[in-house]
Amino acid sequence: MAASPLNLSIEQGVNFEITITVRNKDNTPLNLLSYTAESKLRKHFTSTTAYPFTVTFVDRINGRISLSMDDSVTVTLKEGRYVYDIILTSPNNFKTRVIQGTVLVSPGVSY
């Protein structure tokens, strides 16, 4: 399964959360029972500094996951473009990049 593109926007200094449905090639939701997931944000692909998203399974049977980042993390992000991806690990330990994209971090005024 090739990674689906999804670009995001994060505002500095506030909580971020988005719910995503992971789909099979035939566009049906991927059953995520017994899967694990991880997701990180980096300034560029080779950056050694990574900002992890919290990944929560909202509805495993219907392929729904949530990515979130606390305001204590978003406040440390500098304005600009970043890259991220979401990696799923199946019950038989097969890893797949299911979503990838860019993240635009916009500056905050009131934080």
Image (cartoon, grey):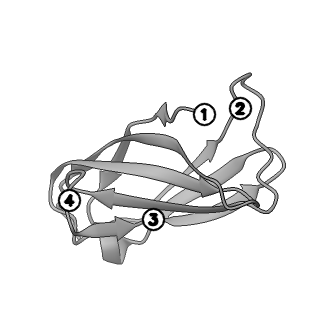
Mark 2–mark 1 CB contact (< 8 Å): yes
Sort mark 3 into few (<14), some (14-19) or many (20+) by Cα contacts within 10 Å.
Answer: many
* Position in image of residue 55 (x %, y %): 57, 64
User: Disc 4 to disc 3, how far (Cα)?
Assistant: 20 Å
Alpha carbon of mark 1 to alpha carbon of mark 4: how far?
A: 37 Å
Amino acid tagged 3: Phe
As shown in the figure, which amino acid type bears the numbered disc 2?
Asn
**Above-or-below relation of 105 to 48:** above
Mark 1 burial class by Cα count in 10 Å: few <14, some 14-19, many 20+: few
* Residue 108 marker: 4
Q: Nearer the viewer, mark 1 or mark 3?
A: 1
- Mark nearest the camera among 4 and 3 is 3
**Secondary structure beneath label 2:** loop
**Residue position marked by numbered label 1 in the rendering:** 1
Q: Secondary structure at mark 4?
A: loop
Q: Which tag, 1 or 3, sits closer to the chain's start?
A: 1
Circle 1 sits in a helix, a strand or a loop, which is it?
Answer: loop
Per the image, the residue denoted by label 3 is 53
Numbered disc in front, either 2 or 3: 2
Write the residue at 76% across / 52% down. 32
